[in-house]
Image: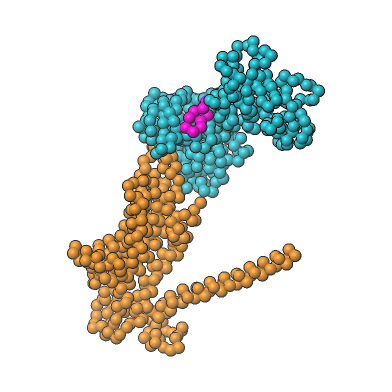
Amino acid sequence: MAERYESIIEKQSKISSFFRILILILFLFFTIFPLLWIFLTSLKGRLDIFALPPRFFFQPTIENYRGLFVKTFLEGGVGQTDFGLILANSIIEAGLGTFFAVVLGVMAGYACSRFNFFGKNDYLFFTLSTRMLPPVAVIIPIYIMFSRIGLSDTRSGMILIYTMSNLGLAIWIMKGFFDSLPRQYEEAGFVDGYTRWQIFWKILIPSVRGGIAATLGFCFIFAWNEFTFATILTTRFAKTLPPRITTSLGAAGLEWGQIAAAGFIVVVPVLILFILIRNYLLMGMTFGVLGRR
Amino acid sequence: MAGVILKNLWKKYGKVEAVKGIHLNIEDQEFVAFLGPSGCGKTSTMRMIAGLEKITSGEIYIGDRLVNNLDPAIRNIAMAFESYALYPPMTVFENIAFPLRAMKFPENVIREKVQRITEILELTDVLNKYPKGLSGGHQQRVSLARALIRDADVYLLDEPISHLDTKMRNRMRAELKRIHSELGKTMIYVTHDQIEALAMADKVVVMNFGVIHQVGTPADIYFKPQDLFVADFVGEPPMNFIDCTVGLEEESFNACFDQFHIKIADKTKQSVLADIPNLEFQSFILGIRPSNIDIIQKDQMDQGTTVEGRIFTLEPLGDSKIVHVLLGDKQLLVETSPDFIGESDDVIRLRFHPDHLLLFDKKSEKAIFL
């Protein structure tokens, strides 16, 4: 009896693991294939892109990547395109926006974790609600404000936007991580003659490295991919990659090859970042509650 | 080196009164244990001495210095926390050296001091490990080492061995007592474990609900509890309590309950009982420890000091045997030798050691010393 029962369980677990693997394979296909296709398309010439049936094997070319940076003959001659500037914009704006959001978020998260101050809960709710609002809801007032004070189409304006829109999340994630550290860390330090600031740097920051990594990842990916603000608030000087890709209209119509190449360039840093911080992502999503003892 | 004096110390958290105006004098080099159930105010008191908790009112002196408003750092105290509070990003060595680095000791002195304290606490083989990979016992000892490495006036130990297993706890009790006598420093030790308090401390402070119930040597606490709480809290198995009245019969004061009469004091001796007005109308509680009751053979009848009971159940505990005895409708614990043989519902006679009987006033719960 017991034997039969065990064999049933074994059979069930075999079946369920089969389905699990099947589902994973399907899911993998859905997520990986578009990426793969973008990558392949970015290496194809014009003829290969439009070939039917689609070609998986072809003579690869880096013409599309070159075309992103250098003007083609059809575009009216020699010189660089704006792509280099836009790539730099994306890196600077998303990078600095993330940096400020994380620095401020770590400190504010610590303050919210350890101190009680007037209106703390309202403040915490408010900071998170900025993240819940869809950008479209606030874009018009922000647009008007930006154009009045001359921040439209400036890098500093976009850095401000990305700092602001990421700060709420950064505070919440970091508050969760600091909450998981016992207050005795500080108290032991006080007794031994350290200041709060010294303990913060020497003990607490190294203890929440994972949280900082997760916050960095979340904020950077958000800012890097952000489309709405970038489309409305920038035109030339501060434009970032996401809106630029959609406007890859060359002289010869839609440059699918270049769009694919630009798309791939956008995806790569996100991919690398995800791989680097994948261990911390779950911790970050649960505000530091899971994944720590 | 210094003693600690608490004067009318209060701590309120909002409306909750955690410590209610306690007075205490801790001598230099003394090992004092704060004993009480959780929430009794012992940890709050210690945290106020450390300066981690603001004092609501009252005064704290360390040595002859009023420390009410001093930062923890300049009180020159060392503290070990119940939760260890070891720093995960640092190795054991760095954790232990951390307080010394704050005081800017030169590297070779730090090494020497860490070496010495880790030899005492047997931590030399884990110096390069991180706290996360250590067992609870090791973590606790690292936390102790971090406190003991300091040259502080007062050492505050908050339940430092409560998370260890029994074997380790027994060993650490002896270690700590030994370390105390070697260092010759004032130590304050918070615990809810009466065995720890009695075994280690020179002086035990029994607290409950923010009030000190008794301050005394372990022997005082055990043999002369000043009130019902102390009598009940200290001792394992717990003391038996019997509601009774006291009457004067045949030249002696007797404690009476149900049909039983137990002689507690001679009339001829000077007895405080003689001064209590309306003695026979007052309610009392008779207390006796399970180890102070003998089970006697039926033939040794002695009506004056023995009572008849029925065995409810038996618990053999190795070195001793606990017999639950029904006396009328009351259940008493009797600690007897392991070779006592008996079965449930057997009728036996009990003799209460007259020297170890305790009497408490039922209303005030204070002990009446006969």
The chain letter corresponding to orange is A
Q: Residue at x 30, y 85 (%)?
A: A253
Q: Position of residue B187 (x, y in %)?
A: 49, 29
Q: Which residues are magenta?
A: B206-214
Q: Main secondary structure of the magenta part?
A: strand
Q: Residue at x 27, y 61 (%)?
A: A160
Q: Position of residue B56 (x, y in %)?
A: 38, 33
In the rendered image of this protein, does residue A28 appear above or below residue B105?
A: below
Q: Position of residue A279 (x, y in %)?
A: 47, 60
Residue B254's image quarter? top right
- Residue B212 magenta: yes
* Most foreground residue, A208 or B69: B69
Residue B291's image quarter? top right
In the rendered image of this protein, does residue A16 appear above or below residue B301?
A: below
Q: Colour of chain B?
A: cyan
B337 sits to left or right of A255: right
Toward the right, the furthest residue is: B299
B169 sits to left or right of B34: right
- Residue A142 magenta: no
- Quadrant occupied by the N terminus of chain A: bottom right
In the rendered image of this protein, does residue B146 appear above or below residue B222?
A: below
* Most foreground residue, B130 or A200: A200
Q: Position of residue A109 (x, y in %)?
A: 37, 52
Q: Residue at x 31, y 57 (%)?
A: A100
Toward the top, the furthest residue is: B268
Q: Residue at x 21, y 66 (%)?
A: A144
* Most foreground residue, B271 or A265: B271
